[in-house]
Amino acid sequence: MSDSKSPQPSNFDKEMAKVFDQAAIAIGIICAFNFKILCQGLKEVGTLGRFLKWLIPITLISYMVVRYQWQLDFLYWLSPKFFHNERLEAIFYLGTLKNVSGVAGISTLVWLWICGIIPTIRLRGYQNALDCLGLKNAKDFAPKVVDATRLDTYRVSLKVLAPGIGVEKIKARRDELQSSFEKDIEEINRFKNPKYVEIILSTKFLPDFVDFSQALENLTESGSFIVGESKKEFVTCEIAKLPHMMIAGTTGGGKSQFFKQLLTGLLKSTDHLQMHLIDMKGGLEFRDFATLPNVKVAKTIEASVSTLRKVKKEMDARFDYLEEKGVQQIEPERHPFDRIVIGVDEASVLYAQARRDDEDYDLICEARNLTEKIAKLGRAAAINLVLATQKVSKESIDTRIQENITGRMCFKTGTPEGSVRVLGNAKASHLPATPGRGVWQFGNEECEVQAPYLSTNAMKEVLQEVKEEYQTGAKTVKQKNKEVDTPMTTSAPVTTKPLTKEMLLNDTQS
Ligand SMILES: Nc1ncnc2c1ncn2[C@@H]1O[C@H](COP(=O)(O)OP(=O)(O)OP(=O)(O)O)[C@@H](O)[C@H]1O
Ligand SMILES: [Mg+2]
């Protein structure tokens, strides 16, 4: 009944109501946007400790402002009409505490807003770059950049909400992402919650070529070698810390080149070193090293096994010494022993699982067994293994050897599985096809590097310098390497049987 009596709204009222609604929505959006900026500001500040650290000077400054009544001057300057004398007086009589709290509160909000506005604009930029790809799920939802965290000077990690899109679909657009962000896409990972994807951007691009001679100046530590140039620094590694390493990747990735520069670096930086190099592809790769007095090269399976037997014998002798002297580890600088490095290029050829009727069957099994023992115990005896291989599988390099390898340099692999077998992740399969570009993994550390290139002439020059150092006595070997020169037939075979699980258990227990 009352409806029929109530006055109908005029057109003007309807217009006003519409304007009011739109204004309310606009104010709501502005408030929400500013609230988001403030939250982002809070996130930028980080911890409560940091927040309080800032709050103290803000409160002190606010006290100064109130003391000299600058807040009243400021309000009057802002709007003389609104903040007329009576209002300002009312504010003044609120008292010092309320005035200081007000000024400090408003200043904190302004400060948080300033802290938040730059990351918000940056986030918007990342979002625009991501939108350029036109990625969408079946419900037309485009991925949203929800967070950006700076990892270091060069790298930023983006957290992207991408339900129903998935990491593989984004990885497939890597090139487009790179050109859209105008940054290097270092990694694309899945978050614990599979709705989110992590994109790591880097402003630093790795060089496509690093010259060994220039990189050599970074080789300052004794007994170390160059790994390569990473986005952060020149990476070098002390071989004693490794103690064993593997170089892997598909053909043409740069394994042999890396191997040669590693050996050259070690020969240059180490004073008491013996090297035993095994190259089952005929010894061509190591020909130049053989001219040094402290390097021996084995080219056949017989010579390789002979070398391994003798190194194993030497390792046993070193353990006797350790026991006798009551020390934990051989240190070539202090003890009468040289560091021994065994380098095997094309390791899969040496360790390839042979059939029982194969004529080299016993020798291959022996090579595997000896290498496994050296890998397990070599560290304390200052004996290090460096294995290069195209294939990494339990057939090519025994898992018992692999378990003792802590340093891994993996050049590009053809498949993600190939990379997983070496590194435990697929990163090496996503590397660009640049020779010498690899992933270096040492314990928990992992980084992409460009390995140095060492030309044959430059290598010959460095090796000549090392040779001269041996001639002048600047470098010496502490032990004459008679053992390795004796023919293989004179040494007793260690074992020709392949290791069984029982043997391994006995070995571990003993
Ligand atoms: N660090 C590097 N910088 C620039 N070029 C490189 C680098 N490493 C390798 N190359 C180039 O790639 C070529 C192949 O390298 P290398 O012989 O070391 O590959 P590989 O992995 O040992 O291959 P394979 O498995 O067939 O033996 C080299 O001849 C060289 O031209
Ligand atoms: Mg090679």
Image (spheres, rainbow, N blue to C red):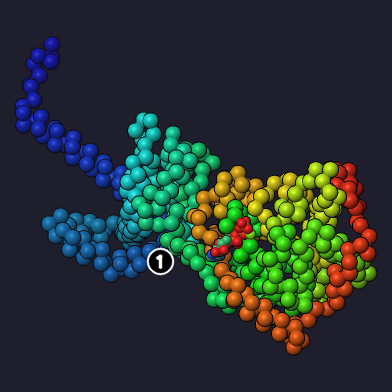
- State the residue position of label 1: 57
From the viewer's perspective, tell me whether residue 240 is left or right of residue 423: right
Position of 464 relative to 90 (above/below): below
Q: Position of residue 261 (x, y in %)?
A: 63, 69
Query: Which quadrant is the N terminus positioned in?
Result: top left
Q: Nearer the viewer, residue 14 or 156?
A: 156
Q: Quadrant of the rendered structure where residue 89 is?
A: bottom left
Q: In percent of the image, x 28 and y 70: which residue is there? A: 68
Relative to 201, does residue 18 appear above or below in the rendering?
A: above
Mark 1 lies on a secondary structure that is helix
Q: Residue 490 in the image: state x and y as whole percent.
A: 93, 64
* Residue found farthest to the top: 1
Q: Is residue 77 left or right of residue 42?
A: left
Instruction: Identify which residue is drawn at 70% across, 59% down.
Output: 281
The x, y position of residue 245, in whole percent, is 70, 60
Say which amino acid is labelled 1.
Pro
